[in-house]
Every structure is written in C-alpha cells, then in structure tokens.
Amino acid sequence: MIGEAVRRMLAEESDIVFHYLQDPAQAIAKAVELAPTVILQDLVMPEIDGLTLVKFFRANQKIKDIPLIVLSTKEEPVTKAEAFAVGANDYLVKLPDKIELIARIRYHSRGYINLLERNEAYAALLKSQQALASELDQAAKHVVSLLPPPITDGPIRTDWHFVPSAHLGGDAFGYHWLDEHHFALYLLDVCDHGVGPALLSVSVLNVLRSQSLPNTDFRIPTQVLSTLNETFQMEKHNNLYFTMWYGVYNKLTCVLDYASSGNAQALLYPGAVDLSTPNMLIGGIPGATYSADSSVIGVPARLYIFSDGVHEVHLPDGTLWGQQRLKDFLANPPEGESELKALYATLESAQGFKGLEDDFSIMKVSFV
C-alpha cells in the first residue's frame, strides 16, 4: 500500500524514476544493481527490523553513501534518533505530503549527485597528479643522472650530496677536466623550484659540460660568468636567474682561480677560508662585469662548494642554523661516514622534521 501510494505521488514527475521492492531480503542486492540517488525505506517490514536494514545499507561499500529517507508510522523522537544514529539521512512520517516528499527526494538526490561528481573530479585529479608525480620523478632522476660520479682516486677527489626540496629543484653542479692541466668545478642555484628552474639548471649544466659558450675561455672564470649572464638573461627565461660558483684548478701551479655570483659560496680547509667574490646574479643585468680571485691550494686541502640551502635552515626558535655552524661542522667532520650526508642529517635534526625547505646541494673536492 505504501509503495503504491508513493508511486502515484511521483508518477507525474518526469525527472524521478521510482523502483519498488517488497522483499527486504533482496533490498541490498537491488540497490547495488540500480545504484539509485535516493533510497526510501519503510521502518515497518516483514521478517526484518527496519533499523537493522539501515545498518546493512550503510555497511555495504557500494551503496553506503546513498541518501536514505526512512518512513515511520508516527513522529517518535526516540525512533528518529535511533534512525539517524544508524545512518539515515532523513525521517518522514508516512504518508508525507506529496509536495514535501518530492522536495526532499530532489534535495537529497541533488546532494548525492554533487557528491558523485566531486568524487569523479577528485579521482580524475588524483590520477592526473599521480601521472604528473611519476613524470616529475622521472625528470628528477634524469637531473641526478647528469651529475658526475664521485672521483675516488688521484690527486683530485670528489664527493657530493644532493637532496632537492621538491620533486625538481633548481640546483645543479659538476666538474670535469678542461685539458690535461685544468680542472673546472662549478655549482649553480636557480631561483624557485619545479620544472622551469630544473630545465634552466640542466641547460646551464649542459653548456658548461660541452664548453659550448661562444668566445669563452673556460679556464677564465670571469669570462664564463659574463657569457652565461648574457646568454641566460632572465627576461628570456621566464624571469629566472641563478647564483653560481665557478672555479678552475691548475694542477701544475696548484692555483685555484674562482668567481662567484650572488650568495654562492665555497669554503677551503684547513682554515675555513671563504672563497667567494662579490658579483651580481647571473641573468639579472645585461653587460654586468664580474671579478675573480685566486688561491694557492696547499696539500692536503678540502674545498666545499654549496648553495644557500646548506646553511639557511630555520630552527624552531626562529633563528637560522647559519654559516658559522656550517664552518664549525666542516672543520671537524665526523669520522667513519660521509660528512656531507651527516651534515644533512644534522640539519634535519636541528629543524625538527624531515626534509629541508630549500635544495640541499654541497660538493666536496679533496686535494691530496
């Protein structure tokens, strides 16, 4: 009788399709089959308690979110509270007014359809994000593959540690022999993070490795920085600029010529000697001039070249870890492990959580 009465109320509503089932034992299977946008359920039915059936609806993963309106014989606060407690979305005394019933059906149906659309959009977004993350991960691996392997024997030995703050960072570095006697080493830090900075850093890295800058003697640091500045002006590269440290070591004279721009730095040990020069950022001003300096390298010696992410680490008290702590740490590195990895672990511990806010890039060059 109730089912027929509801059918008649909804008969003229072209946007509502009504399905009726008398056997409560088949209700779950039928709901899964039909995937309705609203379920009307009488609390009085044969062989099963109506509130128990509500629990069954809510326990099924395929239909647990479908709005459920229970129909009761009278307005009972206790029964109403129990119905809501087990998962009902609405409560009507049968038989409700036709206008009210249709309004409630449409209200709950619209809400559920909106939920389905949000879930679909979220699933599509999640899939897109997963695909993007996979691509970024592959790109990050490609960037790391361009970094040179450590040199473990000979008069010049190298080690490095690189941890980008995002999937793709803006740092890059490298070293190679320019000729029989000159060894070039360099580190750059592009502003910002992500695909754009990573692409720029890779472009600069490839130019340096291939020595493809025009009219440039790669044994002269000022020429390298000047030509890079003209080649990578920020207005032509999405307003991206970078800092850089570039040096050339002459193994015959044991002299290291170097030039740095922005806050790119290097420390020479023993003594924690600062090897940096006050120069403009690369890509900032066309025609900028760059100064260089030189240092005689005594043997043995350790040279650390790094970006600002190695010392500009915020501590819980609001201060920075700072350059002095960095100098002290490198002056007495821990034994039995790579001091570069130990440094990263120390910074994470100091700030109190995993992962640093900026790219962590440091290169060690040992002269033995």
Image (cartoon, helix red, strand yellow):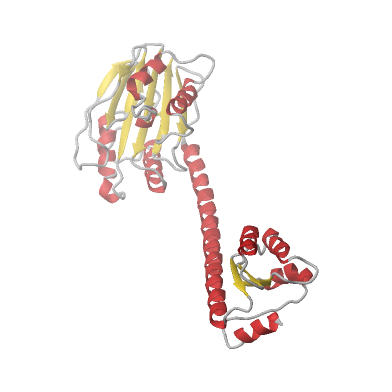
Image location (x, y in percent) of residue 226: 24, 36
Q: Which of 279 and 116 is in front in this view?
A: 116
Image location (x, y in percent) of residue 255: 32, 17
Number of numbered discs present?
Answer: 0
Q: What is the quadrant of residue 69 in the picture?
A: bottom right
Q: What is the quadrant of residue 101 in the picture?
A: bottom right
In the rendered image, the vertical position of residue 305 relative to residue 129, given as above or below = above
Q: Which of 346 and 183 is in front in this view?
A: 346
Image location (x, y in percent) of residue 285: 20, 42
Q: Nearer the viewer, residue 118 or 100?
A: 100
The answer to whether 342 appears left or right of 258 in the picture is right
In the rendered image, the vertical position of residue 14 relative to residue 197, given as above or below = below
Furthest residue in direction right, as rendered: 47
Q: Nearer the viewer, residue 107 or 160?
A: 107
Residue 269 visible in the picture = yes
In the rendered image, the vertical position of residue 353 relative to residue 364, given as above or below = below
Quadrant for the C terminus, please.
top left
User: Which residue sits at x=47%, y=32%?
Assistant: 353
In the rendered image, the vertical position of residue 59 relative to residue 253, given as above or below = below
Quadrant for the N terminus, please.
bottom right
User: Which residue sits at x=57%, y=81%?
Assistant: 97
Image location (x, y in percent) of residue 356: 43, 34
The answer to whether 269 appears left or right of 162 in the picture is left
Residue 184 visible in the picture = no
User: Which residue sits at x=72%, y=64%?
Assistant: 53
